[in-house]
Amino acid sequence: MTFRADRFEWGDDAELTWHDEWSLDFDPDQPRDPAGTSTGGQWTSGSSGSSTSIFVSTPVHDFDPNQARVPGGSPEGGEWTSEGGGVGGGLVASRNITSKKAAAEGGYARPDVQAMRQSPKNFKHDVELFSNKDAYPNFKPGELSGTPDERARTIIDHLKTNLRLMYDNASPAIRQSGMGWYDKANKLAVADAKAFGIDEKSAAAVIAALSPQKDWNMNVYLAHRVMEINATQKNFRWDSKMDATANAIWKPKDRELVNAVKGKTLGELSDPVEKAVWIRTHDEAHSDRSYRDFDTGQVVTTAKGVPAKAAWQSIPSIANAVSAMDSKGDMKVISDSLGDRHKVRSFYNNIVAPHAPNGDVTVDTHAVGAALLRPLSGSDTAVMQALGTAPLGSEKPPGWKAASNSVVTGLKGTYGIYADAYREVAKDVGILPQQLQAITWQAKRALFDIGDKKKEVVEQEWINYHQGKQTLAQTQHKVLSITRD
């Protein structure tokens, strides 16, 4: 299936997830695989993605045949196997290698430091990013020295101290909630799948595909509405309310798409992009877009006490969700709909198999903030480098350098460093990495639910640490005190 990039409106929260007929504009400073080498070739602004002609033999993780497995036939997924570039039981490789030869070998691949070593040049570049004092005041001058492996070890050890602090200081309620968070998300996907007559893996993929840069409660609403509208409104014909809504929400450049679906029923459409436009327009025309808190079930409200309204994802993200929904559990379609971002692919795995032993970690903005013990946002350098993204437009933070992205290794950004820190702390405390991430994710959100002034004070404490004015333990204690006052 091929999607035309010129049909899409790229919103602020859009993810680059399609793999055919793109023009991928990466940051010009981003490291590239050397042109003319056996490992690949430079990124260009021409066609890229699944049509790449790069061939490489890339190591993948082969699990011990005696390791514990998720019971076959259970809601958690099924036994691990090596099937077509991923794993069995409805799971996908969280490090998506798009080299044809590597993908054909099968097996499971994940983002970690071991994988980062496959490209020494990129590995060296990525660990050196942490020496930027503006983006990472967590490290003192000269603290990050030595080989890339030695630097990575220092970085991971620092992240671990912060994660362990977050875990140790999490309330009993947060710990209990975090331990079962992905089980609850799994049950949600299973319930929607049963309610709307689709495959359970497809339902989990719908949720994951709509997750980038979205509040979780809003994410749940959007996924539910995509599945609900698709199941219940197939015979509903585009009406005057949808006409008025379309005029309000779609830009002139989207007019061709709107005209393609105008006057039709949803059941008359087959193109995921057209269905995405129809579904969003219907929801905005025929619902108030209020949504509920995942944990409490209460309607989410604004600071003024009125019901908050869900904001829809971009067209390509909704179209990804539609493709997953219509996949009937086809793992190739599901994998393609999830794109190449580690966060989305890991999130899907964590939802579809909450107790899988593969160590997938959903590293998002909050997960990066928890590991650095800082109130970061999606526009902060550390977060963008972790996720392998870049600033929108021409404005870049001071000293900005993009983290590496490679079709050869399938790696995006410094994600593997954070993921390994979570894995190691989880092992230390005797829980799964995804459980630790869920606990610290909730703890971080609660801890840094503070105003901008206090956030500035927290950042200043890390600057004081960087300048040698206080110890790490003192800095961590002061951060906790600031957030609790």
Image (cartoon, rainbow, N blue to C red):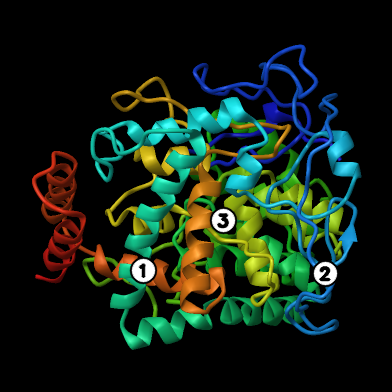
Mark 1 residue crowding within 10 angstroms, few (<14) / some (14–19) / many (20+): many
- Disc 3 and disc 1 in contact, CB within 8 angstroms: no
Q: Residue 188 in the image: state x and y as whole percent.
A: 62, 79
- Looking at the rendered structure, the kind of residue marked 2 is Trp
Query: Disc 3 residue type?
Result: Lys
Question: Is 172 in front, or is 259?
Answer: 172
Q: Which residue is mark 2?
A: 80
Q: CA distance from mark 3 to mark 2?
A: 49 Å
Q: Residue at x 84, y 75 (%)?
A: 79
Q: Position of residue 350 (x, y in %)?
A: 63, 68
Q: Nearer the viewer, mark 3 or mark 1?
A: 1
| Location of the N terminus (image quadrant) | top right
Residue that badge 3 annotates:
241
Q: Give the answer, above or below, for where 121 lies relative to 292.
A: above
**Residue named by callout 1:** 164
Q: Nearer the observer, disc 1 or disc 2?
A: 1
Viewer can see residue 226: no
Closest to the camera, between mark 3 and mark 2, is: 2
Q: Residue at x 66, y 77 (%)?
A: 355
Q: Residue at x 62, y 21 (%)?
A: 32
Q: Position of residue 470 (x, y in %)?
A: 11, 51
